[in-house]
Amino acid sequence: MSTTREVVDLTGGPEVVVEHINVVDEDTGRFEVATVADDRRWHVDISRDGDCKVVRAWDGNIIVDGDEPDWLFELASLALAS
């Protein structure tokens, strides 16, 4: 499976690198979102109907819980628009 990697500038958020890493099911894809300025990253499941769920988050190499900035969910609307 080929991966797609794209740099995205989010409104009200930092510049991020988004990479499609997996297909969860026929309606949902898993993406890795990493901030360019620091070592934060998330695995996010985005469905075709716009549902966005954070699966796991890291700050550097440490797994963190509850570290979902509001701008992260803007990705669901961008994914649907493309």
Image (spheres, grey):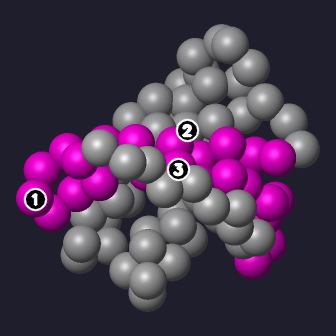
Q: Name the residue under label 3.
A: 19
- Indicate left or right for 33 with 59 as reference: left
Res 80 seen here = yes
Q: What segment carries the magenta color? A: 11-36
Residue 31 shown left or right of residue 28 in the figure: right
Which residue, given by chain and number where applicable, does mark 1 sit on? Answer: 26
Q: Identify the image quadrant of residue 51.
A: bottom left
Q: How far apart are marks 2 and 1 (CA)?
A: 21 Å
Q: In this view, does 65 lie above or below 69?
A: above
Quarter-of-image position of residue 27: bottom left
Disc 3 residue crowd, few under 14, some 14–19, many 20+, Cα 10 Å: some
Q: Is mark 1 on a helix, strand or loop?
A: loop
Identify the image quadrant of the N terminus: top left
Q: Could you tell me if the residues under marks 2 and 3 are in contact, i.e. CB atoms within 8 Å?
A: no
Residue at the (68%, 52%) spot, across then down: 17
Question: How many labels, in total?
Answer: 3
Residue type at mark 2 is Trp
**Identity of the amino acid at label 3?**
Glu
Residue 3 in picture, x, y percent from top left: 43, 49
Q: Does the magenta stretch include residue 22?
A: yes
| Residue 70 seen | no
Q: Name the residue under label 2.
A: 42
Q: Does the magenta stretch mainly form a helix, a strand or a loop?
A: strand
Q: Which residue lies furthest to the front in this view?
A: 2
Label 1 sits on what residue type? Answer: Glu
Q: How much space separates mark 1 and mark 3, taking CA atoms?
A: 18 Å
Helix, strand or loop status at disc 3:
strand
Instruction: Using a 10 Å C-alpha cutoff, classify the residue at mark 1 as few (fewer than 14 neighbours), some (14 to 19) or many (20 or more).
Output: few
Residue drawn where x is 12% and y is 50% of the image: 25
Residue placed farthest to the top in the image?
Answer: 62
Marks 2/3: CA–CA distance: 11 Å
